[in-house]
Amino acid sequence: MNLQREWTQQILIEIEKFRNSSDPDIIIGNITSLRSLLKHFRKELFEENKTLDVGDYIMAHRNDKHPVQLSVIQTIPVLAAFNPSVFVTKHLRTSVLFLLDIAKTAKDSKIKSSCYFNLAKLIDLVDIKYLQDYLSDIMSALSYELERFNKPTCIEVIKCFQSLSSKFKKKILETANLNRYIDTILINGLHPQSLEVLTEISKMESNDTRSVETQLKLLYMIGYVLQGEIYQFKEKHLEHIPMKNVLEFQKRISDEPSIDKKEAAIAQALQALTNYDFSDVAKVHLFH
């Protein structure tokens, strides 16, 4: 413990010496060192240093150029986990709005992915009562990204939606257009992460209508990727399934030119056909 205290104080003293430096290498080195300390050492070890506010130092560099900015993005969840009460008071609002803004405007795919990856981590870490004021902004940002249908798909956006829907299940059921989200996630590609999210969405409601619809949409999507056209199931197999949302989805995929039908997409479609649980659709056929 004494050795850890000595190391911590020595590192903080060295960072303090160069806190006003504008050299990107020094700033990245400082933030990287602080990230390691925050991950592995207890906050009591920081209390003896009264001159360097670690959170303020890190967040002050959020608008620096790319390499420094990426280092800040990667450190935000670590800062939140280190001292949650201080983080939500001083840095939560700035952090959420910063990550959303950079994710939306970033031309570098690595920066965009890192923003959503670390936003998902932040959502997992922070108590729901502190995040609820930002739910609408985050949902809007995720919808914006998914509806662009960029290739390659930013999987971290879907991971972020997964974290959000897990934490705000009731609120999302009340306010979000889940049919639209399901359709858009499918059109972005049959990635394993996407299928995992669809399974979780299907379980959010007590009735199984959503699950049956989702499984049928997925079957149509698989058929479209493999055949290049909408597969038509025999009408007798569909008579007990609510079809309004499914028919709207069929039209969307028919009208969407960005749907990938290349080798990787075909492999994902075959994997989805093999691994996804279609038991609710099967039950409808079995009992009727």
Image (cartoon, rainbow, N blue to C red):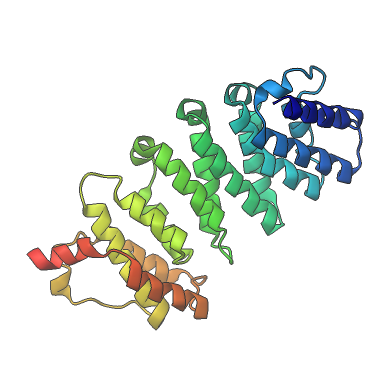
Looking at the image, is 248 positioned above or below residue 232?
above
Q: Position of residue 245 (x, y in %)?
A: 29, 58
What residue is at 82 percent from the left and 19 percent from the top? 51
What residue is at 59 percent from the left and 32 percent from the top? 81
Question: Given the current orientation, which residue lies at the most extreme front position?
Answer: 2
Looking at the image, is 138 positioned above or below residue 10?
below
Pick whichever, 73 or 256, lies toward us. Answer: 73
Asked whether residue 225 appears in the rendered view, the answer is: yes
| Left or right of residue 85, residue 239 in this image | left
Q: Position of residue 201 (x, y in %)?
A: 35, 50
Question: Given the current orientation, which residue lies at the most extreme bottom position?
Answer: 227
Pick whichever, 115 or 183, lies toward us. Answer: 115
Q: Position of residue 286 (x, y in %)?
A: 11, 67
- Quarter of the image with the N terminus in it: top right
| Left or right of residue 249, residue 58 in this image | right
Looking at the image, is 269 positioned above or below residue 69?
below
Location of residue 120 by image quarter: top right
What residue is at 48 percent from the left and 71 percent from the top? 259
Location of residue 109 by image quarter: bottom right
| Left or right of residue 14, residue 188 in this image | left
Asked whether residue 262 appears in the rendered view, the answer is: no
Q: Position of residue 12 (x, y in %)?
A: 82, 28
Question: Given the current orientation, which residue lies at the most extreme left position?
Answer: 288
- Quarter of the image with the C terminus in it: bottom left
What residue is at 33 percent from the left and 65 percent from the top? 276
